[in-house]
Structure formats: structure tokens, C-alpha cells
Amino acid sequence: MDRSRNVDDSPGIARAIECAASLRNVRRTVAFPAGRYVLRTPLRPHYNALTLAGPELSPDAAPGDPETATLVAIPCNPEQFPGAIQVSRAVRPNGHVVDAVAGLRIRNLQIELTEGPRKTANSGIQLNNCSFCEVENVIMRYAPLSPQLPSCKPSNLDGISFAMGSGGVIRNVIVDGVPKGGIYLASVVRYHATPPILVENCEIKNINGPIGAGGIKIVTANVTVRNCEVHHSLIHPGDGSTTVYGGHGLWIAAQVPSRIALPGSVPTNVVVQDSYFHHNGGAGVVMASPLLRQRPERIVLQRVKSAYNGYHGVHLQAGNDVELHDLWSWGNGYYGVHLQSRTSLPTNALRIGTVILANPLVFNNALRPASGAYPGIMIQASNVTIYGGEVARCSASRGRQSRSVQQLCWLSGPTDGEALFYPQDNRIAGVGTHDTSAPEALVCPHE
């Protein structure tokens, strides 16, 4: 618990973990007294029914609060050992290989990350193949040992990751300033197990690195997110430019396989409730897929708010069986909701299937354009149903959203092989307007 950087508390903590694991109790606990613990290599609690816990932690605790337990990760090799806690496949001293860990709990800890990988991705807390695991009442911050521009942060450091079949709960967590992804959920459907994951009462903020910055990233199945706030995600390119761009609040996307032998990872059965995505450089919520035949499926957003994001409030680039109930989207840079089937993939790529918007409230968007008239909801897709709600503009000084709902044909396909597509079977009923035009009939400007 020395204040210097030249100590290493990880071997002593590792011995305490081994000692606790040797007990025959149903639930074993390694308790961290208040203080500062320097980790030169991450802790590896590869045991079932084990708890790592510090003293009671308030969400208002200041960095390094002496009444809390703070783990400071100063990795000897950031590429291999970047974070504080790593759970993955383990080989015990007797040679027995343990494929999974069950019932691990990580509670009441502050974590400071000082460096991380710039090649192979890893996380401050990385849980692989960890079932019924919990991360609760944790504050994680990126805190480099010397001042560092966001564009110089490690490009592949995430905050908290559940991957390779992990499931459980992430609750009452704050992730602040991590470069790539605040919370990253990534198991490969049809290859790994995909037990339920609940992300609840979390705040993810200031996720700002050189690539891929995003608050919550979901590339797996069976996830519920509720009562979360995600804000100020920004990408700072490492090319010397001072321009910031991108950085989404919530990213629900299929992902290309990391190895040829693996199938792509496709999100399914995802529910997001009572959450707020605001002041992100890109969109508040994005659904997408780079895969030809796969897209997010069975996605439900209920009472989600998306505001003051640099791009769209909700940007649906790929998805099927998507429902948005009681969505609020306001003050975004462009459209409140954009359903966009356009892609550079072959023209037979699966993009947007059935989408329902029930009772949306979309107002005061299109803050970025200096001229022109923009809709609150832009539809370039088929099989879209919108009923109820309102698309409004409160005053002429609040954005250029003077249209309500607009439908357009779209070009899609690889360069020099594009085809023109027509929206079909779209239904719009009962949508109220205030200082915006009525929902518009289909227009095909490319004909």
C-alpha cells in the first residue's frame, strides 16, 4: 500500500487468493482493507465462489480516497498484462485445466488503469468464460502516470469485458476515461455459451481514445441494459488532427470473426430500458453489421432517451425484429432516428428487416446543418411501422428539423454494382406534428 510506483502488491494478493481458495467454505472472500495496492501484473482469481471486496464504496468517492480500496494497475507488459483483474482459462500447478469459473464477485473497489494494449485488445477487468459472475460497486478510471492526450491513449484498452461465454451482472459501476469501450460484451453465438448478462445502474463517461471509442458495446446475445447513463464518448484520431468525431453511446453490432474458424458474433435478444445516451460524438444508439447474411435480431429499446449526440439519436444500419417503444430523441446533430439500409456489401446483404417505432417523441434535431430542412425520422428501409407519438420543433432557433417523417429510396451495393431499392410495406399512423410537416409520401430522387 505504498504511495510509490516501485512496489508490487500483486504477489501478496495472489497468495491471499490461493489461501482463500483452499478453504472449504461455500463462499470465500478476499477482503481488501482501505488503501492503495499497486499491481504490476493483474490478479487472476480462477476459483469458483470467490469474492474480492473492499470497504463500502460510494459512487461519489474521489480518486484514491483513503477510505476506499484502490487497485492501481502499472503493468510490466501492457500488451500482455494491461489490467487489474483477468479471468481466463487457467492451468493449475497439478496440470489440471479449468475451462470455466463460476460465481466470482468483484465488489467495492476503485481501479486505476495507467496503460494498456495498443495491439491485442484487453480490459481493466477481463472475464472470459466466467458464469454467474458479478462486478458491482466498482469505479474504474483511466489515470496515466503522466499527462496524456486522448489521441495517445492505448488504442485497445476496454473497461469491463464479459467475453467467451461469460454471464452475470454488472451493477452500480462507473467507468471513466477508458480509451476504447466502457463495457464490452462479446461472446460468439453458436460457439460460446451465451448466458444472460444484466448491466444495471451504470454510468459510462469520457470514453475517448484514438479508435473505436464507445460507451457500451454489445456483440453477443441475451443482454439486458437498464437505468444506465452513457455520455461524452469521442474518438480522437492519432493523426495530429485536433478534430474529434465519432464515439457512440450504445453500439449493438455483429462482428467479424477474430479467427477464420469462428463464426461471426451476432447480437440477439437484447433489451435496453430506461437509459440515457447523450453528448456522444457519434450517435446515441447504433445497430450495425459488417456481415453479409447476419444482423442484430430481436432488439427492444424501451423508454430510451438519446440527446445532443453529434450524429443521429438512433442510427439503425442493420437489424431485424427491432422495437423502439416510447423513444425520446432530441437535440441531435442530424436525424432523431435514421433507418438506413445502404451498404457497400453485395446487394443481397441482409440489412433492415421488421422495425416498429411505438409512440416516439422526436424533436429539435438537426442542430449541425447551417441550412436546409431535415426530418426527425428518416426512413430508407422497408417493413417499418410507426404509430403514435409526435415529431416536433419547439422553435425555429432549435435545429432544422422542420419535417416529421421522410421516406427515400436508396442505392446499395458495392461500387459500380449498386442497385436502387424502394421502401415497401411501411405504415405510419397517428403521428402528431408540431411545427413540422406531415409524414411524407415516398420519393425516389435517384430515378
Image (spheres, grey):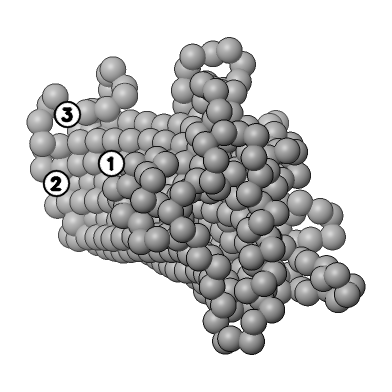
Residue 260 is labelled as none
Q: Quadrant of residue 78?
A: top right
Q: Can you identify the residue that label 2 sits on? A: 433
Q: Earlier in the sequence, mark 1 or mark 3?
A: 1
Amino acid type of the residue that numbered disc 3 sits on in the rendered structure: Arg
Alpha carbon distance from label 1 to label 2: 19 Å
- Which is nearer the eye, 296 or 176? 176
Q: Position of residue 402 (x, y in %)?
A: 20, 33
Q: Can you identify the residue that label 1 sits on? A: 307
Q: How many marks?
A: 3
Q: Earlier in the sequence, mark 1 or mark 2?
A: 1
Q: Position of residue 222 (x, y in %)?
A: 52, 71
Residue under the image location 58 percent in, 86 percent down = 25
Alpha carbon distance from label 1 to label 3: 13 Å
Going by the picture, which residue comes out furthest to the right?
95
Residue under the image location 11 percent in, 43 percent down = 434
- Which is nearer the eye, 138 or 337? 138
Relative to residue 82, is residue 405 drawn left or right? left
Q: Can you identify the residue that label 3 sits on? A: 398
Residue under the image location 21 percent in, 51 percent down = 361
The secondary element bearing badge 2 is classed as strand
Residue under the image location 20 percent in, 36 percent down = 364
Amino acid type of the residue that numbered disc 2 sits on in the rendered structure: Thr
Task: Mark 1 and mark 2 in contact? Answer it, CB < 8 Å.
Answer: no
Q: Position of residue 217 (x, y in %)?
A: 52, 51
Q: Earlier in the sequence, mark 2 or mark 3?
A: 3
Relative to residue 70, is residue 257 drawn left or right? right
Q: Can residue 105 be seen in this snapshot?
A: yes
Amino acid type of the residue that numbered disc 1 sits on in the rendered structure: Ala
User: Is 230 placed above or below 78 here?
Assistant: below
